[in-house]
Image (spheres, rainbow, N blue to C red):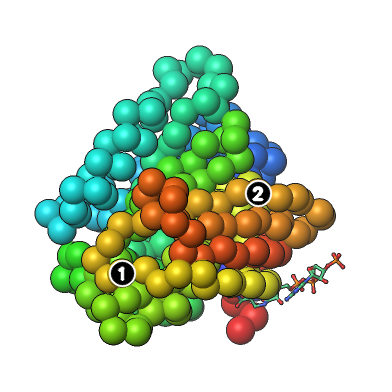
Amino acid sequence: MARNVGRIFSGFRCSGSLPFGKTQLKTRCPRLLLRTTPERTVVQALSSIFSHKSRDFSLPNSSWGEEMMRLYNHYSSQSGEAAEGQEDQGEQWTRLPSYNRSLKYATGGVYLSKIIQSKARLFTRNIRDTGAAFEYVLFFRRDKQRCVCIFQAGHLLEGPPGHVHGGAIATMIDTVTGTHASLLSAPVMTANLNINYRSPIPLGSTVLVESTMDKEEGKKTFLSCRVTSTDGSKLHTEAAALFVSINVSHLLRG
Ligand SMILES: CCCCCCCCCCCCCCCC(=O)SCCNC(=O)CCNC(=O)[C@H](O)C(C)(C)COP(=O)(O)OP(=O)(O)OC[C@H]1O[C@@H](n2cnc3c(N)ncnc32)[C@H](O)[C@@H]1OP(=O)(O)O
C-alpha cells in the first residue's frame, strides 16, 4: 500500500495536478523543462491533465456582471503565452485555470481520489447555479510576485443582510493566498490566517482580492492580502497569511 501510494505520488507530482514550485517541477518532471516559467508550466500541465469535458470555472459565464467582465478583459489583454523557447520575463499576467476536481484527472488520481474521497469537490467550485456563490478568476504576475483575483459574490454568500458573510470572504482570501503560495512554494497548507474586516462587501458586487508575497523562510511563506473595491478606493478587508510547505503524503495522515 505504502509503495503504491509512493508511486502514485510521483506520478501525481509530475502531473501538475497540484501546484508545484520551480525546483520540484524541474527535478521531478524533466519533460516539462521546455516550459519557461513555473506558473506557465502549472497552467499547461493542469490544462492537459484535465479532460476536455472538465469545465474551467475561471472562464466567463453568463452570470458575470459588467464590472467582472471589464476587469477580466483588462487582465486578459495583459496576458499571453510566450512562444516555445522564448524567454519569458514574467511581465505579463497569467490566468490560472480552475477545476472542481483536483485529483480525479491526475496521473493515479482516480486511485488517490478514492482514498481521499471520490465525491470530493473543490469547496468554492461546487455550486451548480452559476453566479449564486463564488464567481472568480485569478491572474498571476511573476515579476511582481502578485496574484490578483476578480471576485463576484453571489446571493448564497449572504451574512449580514445584503452583504457578504465573513467566512466567505475568508474563503476567498485563503483561496487566493493559498494558490499564490502554491505557485511559489509547492504544495502548502494554511497554518495561520489573520483577518481584519474594515468595511462590508455588498452582495452581488465585484471586488479585487490581491495577494503579495512578503517573505519566505524555509518551509514558511508569508503573504498579505487586501480586498478592495475595483477602483481601489475602498478597503474592505486585509489579512496576513502563513503557509507551510507539505509533502502530499501529509494529506493522507488525517
Ligand atoms: C495553478 C494553480 C491552481 C491551483 C489549483 C489547485 C487547487 C486549488 C487550490 C485552492 C487553494 C485553496 C487553499 C486552501 C488551503 C487550506 O485551506 S489548507 C486547510 C487548512 N489548513 C490545515 O488544515 C492545516 C492543518 N495544520 C497542519 O496540517 C500542520 O500544522 C501544518 C500547517 C502543515 C504545519 O505542520 P508541519 O509541516 O509539521 O510544520 P512544523 O514543522 O510544525 O512547522 C513548520 C514551521 O511553521 C511554523 N508554524 C506551523 N504552524 C504554525 C502556526 N499555526 N502559526 C505560526 N507558525 C506556525 C512552525 O513554528 C515552524 O516554524 P520554524 O520552526 O520552521 O521557524
Circle number at residue 36: none
Residue 244 image offset from top left, x and y in percent: 70, 64
The residue lying toward the viewer, choosing from 8 and 235, is 235
From the viewer's perspective, tell me whether residue 253 is left or right of residue 128.
Answer: right
From the viewer's perspective, tell me whether residue 172 is left or right of residue 161.
Answer: right
Task: Kindly identify the amino acid type of the residue bearing the numbered disc 1.
Answer: Pro
The count of marks equals: 2
> Spatial distance from mark 2 to mark 1, Cα to Cα?
28 Å
Q: Quadrant of residue 229?
A: bottom left
User: Residue, x 51% and y 65% (percent of image)?
Assistant: 237
Circle number at residue 202: 1
Q: If the image is split into quadrants, where does the C terminus sit?
A: bottom right
Q: Is mark 1 within 8 Å of ligand 1?
A: no
Q: Is residue 183 above or below residue 175?
A: above
Residue position marked by numbered label 2 in the rendering = 213
Please identify the residue farthest to the top as the structure is shown.
86
From the viewer's perspective, tell me whether residue 121 is left or right of residue 181.
Answer: left
Q: Is residue 206 above or below residue 147?
A: below
Residue 36 image offset from top left, x and y in percent: 54, 26
One can see residue 21 in this view: yes
